[in-house]
Image: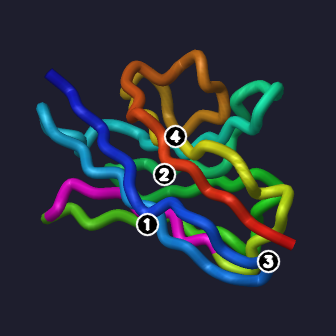
Amino acid sequence: QVQLVESGGGLVQAGGSLRLSCAASGRTFSTYSMGWFRQAPGKEREFVAAMSWRDGTTDYADSVKGRFTVSRDNAKNTVYLQMNSLKPEDTAVYFCGAQNLYGISRIAGLYLYWGQGTQVTVSS
């Protein structure tokens, strides 16, 4: 059974940083692509960043490009989202997802597995 467990969320002031982790277990993820999404109250889940586990190819939403960085640790089967220069509009529950049907994707519906989410709150 595939499990994704996010951690690292919290409360931070605007301009601060957080690093989210997504620990994956249950199968070999070398052929998967991992995605980070977020969902604010009353809004749809939106794409943040994605990475191919196989070759490290990345993609970022325009709203986070230059501020967020996605990376992986193969030995730990963990994907990270380093978030710098945080803004109040980054406040949301952040989810990681995994899929192996396509290359890296911005479409939440394509992801097969999801974590439970971690809350990120950025105060002004």
Nearest the camera: 87 or 1? 87
Question: How many C-alpha atoms fall within 10 Å of the one at disc 4: few (<14), some, or many (≥20)?
Answer: many
Q: Where is residue 23 in the image (x, y as percent from the top left)?
A: 27, 51
Numbered mark located on residue 71 in the image: 1
Q: Mark 1 vs mark 4: which is more N-terminal?
A: 1
- Mark 1–mark 2 Cα distance, whole angstroms, equals 7 Å
Q: Mark 4, mark 2: which one is toward the viewer?
A: 4
Q: Mark 1, mark 4: which one is toward the viewer?
A: 4
Q: Which secondary structure dominates the residues rendered in magenta?
A: strand
Q: Mark 1 vs mark 2: which is more N-terminal?
A: 2
Q: Position of residue 110 (x, y in %)?
A: 54, 19
Question: How many C-alpha atoms fall within 10 Å of the one at disc 3: few (<14), some, or many (≥20)?
Answer: some
Numbered mark located on residue 14 in the image: 3
List the residue tagged with mark 4.
Answer: 95
- Mark 1–mark 4 Cα distance, whole angstroms, equals 15 Å
> Disc 1, disc 2: CB below 8 Å?
yes
Secondary structure at numbered mark 3: loop
Q: Mark 1 vs mark 3: which is more N-terminal?
A: 3
Numbered mark located on residue 51 in the image: 2
Q: Mark 3, mark 4: which one is toward the viewer?
A: 3
- Mark 3–mark 2 Cα distance, whole angstroms, equals 26 Å
Rendered-image quadrant of the C terminus: bottom right
